[in-house]
Image (spheres, rainbow, N blue to C red):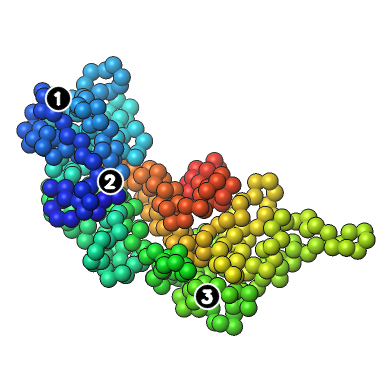
Amino acid sequence: MAGYLGDSRQGKYANGGPPRRRLDAASLPGVLKHQPSRRFLVEEGLPEEGADFRFTGLRAGRLEPFCAGEGDEAVIMGDRRLLVLGESYYWQAWLVLDGTTGGVHLVAWEKDLLRHDLIASGLSELAGLIGEIEAVSEAPRGLDPYGGRRGPAVVAEVRQQARERMRRLDPGLFAGGPQPAHWETSLLIRALHWGARLGVPDELAYVLDPGLIAETAEDGRVHRFAPEELPSGLTHEPTRRLLTEIGLPVNADIFALHDGPLRTMAEVHSALFDTPADEEGEEGKNPYTERGYQRNFIALGWWTLDLAMALDGATGRVELPDWYGEDGPAAYLHRDISALLYACWTYQQLRKEWERWDVGAGGKPGDWAVFTPQELLANRVEDLVEAVDPEAFATSGHSWRQLADDPHTGGLLG
């Protein structure tokens, strides 16, 4: 996604920005009475997609009236005509332009009642807010304002600074009262990539901040390993440094460590790696596993659903065994421990926000008529976790994909 520089109202992105769709003046409907909106659509335009909105209403080169249903008459909100700009990442919600005032609303039907949330005071403000959200998505070019720092503290700084810029862009939307719908959740989703910095060749996939490790721990407990707690088979030096210098969460939302010094899989799960002898006393094929090579891997702990985690001491790769029948997961879990931790942290941040709005913990915010944070989070969580380590979602047999597609849980956040 494009980085943004300068005045958001002018849409100045670092590499030209996402394509903008402009409309011909002759194509604008007569019910669009708001002159600043007419000028903006002709001279500036809007991106086809951005900040979790898809501007499908512009792709046909004209604005259609918002109707109650196919073949129905156009909806009038008060005495104002509504024109379809596009749709959101929520269920059955549309983004519409008020043809009289120029306000931009998120609308949805609740039985025969049209609900709406103001998203932006006007099209110019909408474009600026989208620019700020998309700027957060982009890794810095040239001068890094955080000097290479990454982690939860940087994520918090990024979000706070973006909030301040957005308030200045649309003071009417943010003036007093509750937080406007949509923007805070979309901002959180975009800011999570500031949680860790990409590693360099021959090192771990990510450079992790100790704060991320601590935040991943459910109870704040982090175990930093002493060198004598690491087995001789752990020869992957970047992994050794992470374990001794930063450590691992004792318990995370989705995995837990073994207690005490690390040992091999064969030592911890001896019954499953013992190969019985045949009738002639010769060692036969192991009936429990086709992944016998994992016997000398390191037993790292337990993945969700009571799956054992095996660490390849030579490469740092994290795998799962095949003790779980035909529906057992593929071997690959994560490229290394840093990818495991970053993926779990990303997942946990989204789940924490999802639970904040769950029934019994706040429920649907009374200040929003249409916007549903949980729907947006549920629609984006898979993409965000997959982006950390795409191979972890490579097939339907990989563990993360199985969790995402589990019909009993309703997805990663269900």
Q: Which residue is mark 1?
A: 27
Furthest-left residue in this view: 35
Relative horizontal placement of residue 283, taking residue 130 as reference (left or right): right
Q: Is residue 364 visible?
A: no
Circle 3 — which element?
A: helix
Q: CA distance from mark 1 to mark 3?
A: 64 Å
**Which residue shows up at 60% across the image and 62% down it?**
309
Task: Give the residue at mark 3.
Answer: 237
Q: Nearer the viewer, residue 204 or 103?
A: 204
Rendering coords of residue 277 (x, y %): 87, 62
Q: Residue at 53% across / 59% down in the picture?
A: 334
> Above or below — where is 88 with respect to 76?
below
Left or right: 122 in relation to 390: left
Badge 1 element: helix
Whichever of callouts 3 and 2 sits on the residue coming sooner in the sequence is 2
Asked if marks 3 and 2 touch (Cβ < 8 Å), the reply is no
**Residue 354 visible, this angle:** yes
Query: According to the image, label 2 marks what residue?
Result: 51
Tell me: 111 left or right of 319.
Answer: left
Neighbourhood count class around disc 1 (C-alpha, 10 Å): few under 14, some 14–19, many 20 upward: few
Q: Amino acid at mark 1?
A: Ser
Q: Secondary structure at mark 2?
A: loop
Q: Which sits in the foreground, 358 or 409?
A: 409
- In this view, the residue farthest toward the front is 201
- Circle 2: residue type: Ala
Disc 2 versus disc 1: nearer the observer: 1
Q: Earlier in the sequence, mark 2 or mark 1?
A: 1
